[in-house]
């Protein structure tokens, strides 16, 4: 435990009177060490102290990038709580200094771990998440632009400032270009069916332009705190992007991606593989919650799922054919053998999901 960091954060918050035994480390992700502070006359709070090193690299102090990151979290929490009161921390603030960077936010409780979640409850968690994401996606964001969020000195905006119709066409073109590259590669898969289905999906998709929403790219179980009757969301990684595409992303992560990544060093201790069936139930519940049984929406999510599998397959192929793997990639995706292995798993899933259409 970096005691000096916690003490410094406590001093900055003028909380020196809190007894030491009321401060405890409760978690750690790739980027933050996390402490709970119990207060006698106020609600418990959480300090998330930015690590000085992440994925083996020293993190430079880049103020604008930090403001972008934490303002994004703040705006996500605000929008989320406006859709579903209490789903995210109601209080959030951050402190930036060359010597220490930390956030302070409401404590959202301890949560039931995946391995203790019964399938029925996992489905219900997924359903609640689906219901929330649908309402979050239908909200007007009030933000301009598209893509990654950046602080422009006054407010947050999407980095891409382009005509939305053009962004949508480019998004669709990208899948066709990936499909062409994969078919030209020396890979074993049912090319005829996959190409047919993806072309049909894109043809249909071009005519149904999706809505730009504030979406969350980090919906791993570590960032979902499950309670007996509700679920909280912390540590979002928001961007402005297409709604159904990112609804499909949640399903893709829970039903395929995370279990498939469980061999990589970063995820080895996550238990994703052992809990793959629980995660599938969360994914199925999500579809129900997001679509409320609407057949067009269910079909759209299936399409988006296939497109994510296509992108993932291509990413694996591209990495294997690129330069040496850097440390971060080896941590997140594993060594060449693991990536090669996962490439076969991706190709199988691509074939299977296209056949099931
Ligand atoms: N507001 C919070 N309430 C309760 N637990 C939290 C809160 N923030 C973080 N945690 C715990 O700390 C862990 C790591 O925090 P997180 O913010 O996700 O770190 P990182 O940014 O490195 O991914 C979480 O998985 C969770 O268990
Ligand atoms: Mg996290």
Image (cartoon, rainbow, N blue to C red):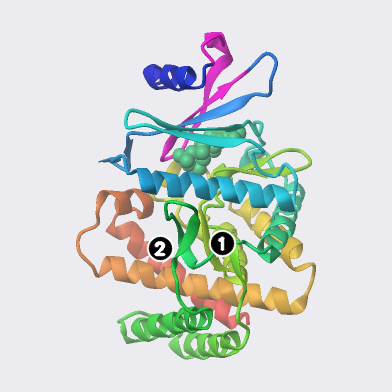
- Return the disc, 2 or 1, that comes first in the chain's sequence: 1
What residue would you read off at disc 1?
A: 143
> Which quadrant of the figure contains the C terminus?
bottom right
- The mark lying in front, picked from 2 and 1, is 1
User: Along the line of sight, which residue is nearer the eye, 264 or 24?
Assistant: 24
In the rendered structure, the answer to whether residue 73 lies left or right of residue 32 reads right
Q: Which residues are magenta?
A: 15-38
**Residue 83: image x %, image y %?**
73, 53
Say whether residue 177 is visible: yes
Q: Quadrant of residue 230?
A: top right
Say whether residue 272 is visible: no
> Which quadrant of the figure contains the N terminus?
top left
Q: Is residue 85 above or below residue 129?
A: above
**Residue 340: image x %, image y %?**
33, 64
What residue would you read off at disc 2?
A: 342
Distance CA(mark 2)–CA(mark 1): 37 Å
**Residue 123: image x %, image y %?**
73, 54
State the residue lying farthest toward the left: 323
Question: Is ligand 2 less than 8 Å from the beta carbon at label 2?
Answer: no
In the rendered structure, the answer to whether residue 341 lies left or right of residue 132 reads left
User: Along the line of sight, which residue is nearer the eye, 43 or 295?
Assistant: 43
**Residue 8: image x %, image y %?**
41, 19
User: Along the line of sight, which residue is nearer the eye, 125 or 117?
Assistant: 125
- Where disc 2 sits, the SS reads helix
- Report the residue at 32% width, 86% height from top: 184
Q: Is residue 40 above or below residue 265?
A: above
In the rendered structure, the answer to whether residue 348 lies left or right of residue 233 reads left
- Report the residue at 30% width, 81% height from top: 186
Q: Are marks 2 and 1 in contact (CB under 8 Å)?
A: no
Question: Is ligand 1 less than 8 Å from the beta carbon at label 1?
Answer: no
User: Along the line of sight, which residue is nearer the eye, 191 or 175?
Assistant: 175
- Report the residue at 58% width, 14% height from top: 22
């Amino acid at each position: 435990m970096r005691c000096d960091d916690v003490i410094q954060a406590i001093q900055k918050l003028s909380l020196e009177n809190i007894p030491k035994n009321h401060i405890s480390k409760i978690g750690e992700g790739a980027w933050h060490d996390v402490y709970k502070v119990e207060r006698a006359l106020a609600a418990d709070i959480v300090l998330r102290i930015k690590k000085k090193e992440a994925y083996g690299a020293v993190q430079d102090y880049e103020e604008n990038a930090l403001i972008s990151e934490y303002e994004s979290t703040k705006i996500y929490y605000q929008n989320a709580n406006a859709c579903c009161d209490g789903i995210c921390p109601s209080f959030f603030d951050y402190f930036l200094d060359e010597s220490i960077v930390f956030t302070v936010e409401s404590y959202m409780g301890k949560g039931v771990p995946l391995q203790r979640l019964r399938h029925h409850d996992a489905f219900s968690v997924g359903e609640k998440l689906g219901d929330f994401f649908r309402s979050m996606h239908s909200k007007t964001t009030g933000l301009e632009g598209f893509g990654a969020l950046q602080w422009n000195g006054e407010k947050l905006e999407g980095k891409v400032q382009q005509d939305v119709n053009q962004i949508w066409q480019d998004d669709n073109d990208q899948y066709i270009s990936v499909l062409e590259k994969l078919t030209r590669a020396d890979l074993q898969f049912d090319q005829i069916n996959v190409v047919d289905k993806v072309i049909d999906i894109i043809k249909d998709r071009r005519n149904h332009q999706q809505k730009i929403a504030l979406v969350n790219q980090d919906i791993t179980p570590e960032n979902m705190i499950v309670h007996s009757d509700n679920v909280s969301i912390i540590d979002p990684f928001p961007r402005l992007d297409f709604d159904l595409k990112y609804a499909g992303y949640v399903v893709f992560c829970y039903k395929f991606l995370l279990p498939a990544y469980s061999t990589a060093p970063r995820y080895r201790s996550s238990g994703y593989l052992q809990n793959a069936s629980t995660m599938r139930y969360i994914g199925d519940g999500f579809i129900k919650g997001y679509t409320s049984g609407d057949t067009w929406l269910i079909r759209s999510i299936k399409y988006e799922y296939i497109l994510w599998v296509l992108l993932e397959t291509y990413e694996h192929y591209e990495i294997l054919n690129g330069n040496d793997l850097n440390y971060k990639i080896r941590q997140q995706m594993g060594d060449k053998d693991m990536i090669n292995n996962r490439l076969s798993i991706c190709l199988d899933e691509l074939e299977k999901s296209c056949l099931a259409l």
